[in-house]
Amino acid sequence: MTERKPQVFTETELREIKEDIDRARRPGAYESGRWSVSPLNRDPEVAGRMPTSVRFRDITLRAIEALPGVVVSTRAKSEYLRQLVEAGVPEIVTAGVRDRGDDELRRDIEMVKSIDPDRRVTCPLVFSARDLAAPARAGYDAVQIWVPPWGTASRLYEAGVHAAAWRGDDWRDLGLPSDRAGFVARAADLVTRARDLGLEVTAPLLMVSFLSIEELLETCSVLVHAGANEIGLFDGPGAMSPEAYGHLVAQTKAHFPDVRVGIHPHNTFGLAVAAAIAAARNGVDVVEVSVNGYCGGPGNADLSVATAAFEALYGVETGIRPERLKALAQAGERLTGYRTAYNHPVTGDRVYNWGGMDFITQELGIDDLLHNAIAPGWSGSTVDIPITEVSGPFTLWDKMIRLGLAPTHQTVETALGMIKSEIEKQGSLLTDAQVKDLCRAAGAPTAPMPAEGHA
């Protein structure tokens, strides 16, 4: 006969506990199976005014090209592009197009459009007129024409300068602009050429933290006049605070209300998502994100974290399919070889595990949104609580059921002592297989049939 798990609370007591918890919750801030957050997050008097929706543009495929030591095949990039589209990302920046054939590029665009004809695909890294032909032929919706931040110092970022110097030539013969106005004019000419080819244009202002408001607005005026559809405020160093970023967005929107404004925050101070929220509060149209925050240096705003922050905390729609986030993050790790921390927000392998103490593990059977503000299943994640040196018998009981065993009061007590002894001996936690072996050694038989429980 199967022994029943000892009952801690009566049904009446459980009902009272649930009612007590629910009294503190408010619709929207609490959604069963999704999240439970403070109602203050949704109060405009506290959090400020937020838009009803925000648009993400994923840059993972371009960003991974900046990751040190990462080499990804064209085929793997194309497959990952499909996964991004299927996850609901509304805009995608692909990998660079140089050295890729027209047929290959066209296949990627056709694949995206076959899933969703309205999905917007942008080509990055346009620096010269010759860079426009391939995206135009392949059917891209838009290109990014980057605008350097300075005058003469912008020559640091001219590939031709270094190539000429390497050949022993004088790069000064390249005819580069001599001041900031010249670099902006060159970018404006590219904007016009791109529009003539039927391409929309995002004009990212690089290292925007170096620009004064006056320089920012003067630059925007030239680019908008040339036909730019969007001004991108790109903060490569991650030197903009959320408040400063919000201010730049507000200024740009106020002076150019008919042009989209996008941001590209970096996570230097762990504030990339906070910068995105501040920008949204000030009217930003699009936020650039990447899977697992991938990019060079400290990386970008993480797609999963940004999705959760906007949707759960503020009730702002993103259009992302959250149940795909965990799988997308794992696929990103396989693609790049770069693993995230075990407690990485939203998609970390153990971010929903709070250890093995009974009073923590048993709360999940009453309400899974107490210590966890986000339900694991919302992002496609799961909970697999390990047996640790502080685990109690109720936790092991649930684990035995998860492992296909039939626990009893005696076998749980015996196995728990054996497991903790082995943990101390090894100096590390045990695998599920090791736990199962010790439980069997303690006398726990295989369960005759599936039983309810969680581990």
Image (cartoon, rainbow, N blue to C red):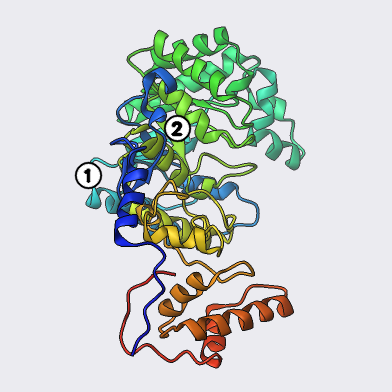
**Spot occupied by residue 78 in the image (x, y as percentages of width and height):** 40, 57
Closest to the observer, 202 or 355: 355
Tell me which residue sits at (63%, 41%) in the image.
298
Q: Is residue 170 visible?
A: yes
Residue 228 occupies which quadrant of the picture? top left
Tell me which residue sits at (65%, 42%) in the image.
297
Mark whose residue sits in front, 1 or 2: 1
**Vertical comparison of 362 with 42: above or below:** below
Residue 445 occupies which quadrant of the picture? bottom left
| Secondary element type, mark 1 | loop
Q: Which residue is mark 2?
A: 144
Q: Which mark is residue 117?
A: 1
Image mark count: 2
Closest to the observer, 390 or 86: 390
Cα distance between the residues tagged 1 and 2? 20 Å
Which amino acid type corresponds to the residue marked 1 in the rendered image?
A: Pro
Residue count near mark 2 (Cα–Cα under 10 Å), binned few <14, some 14–19, many ≥20: many
Please identify the quadrant where the C terminus is shown. Answer: bottom left
Disc on the earlier residue, 1 or 2: 1
Residue count near mark 1 (Cα–Cα under 10 Å), binned few <14, some 14–19, many ≥20: few
Which amino acid type corresponds to the residue marked 2 in the rendered image?
A: Gln
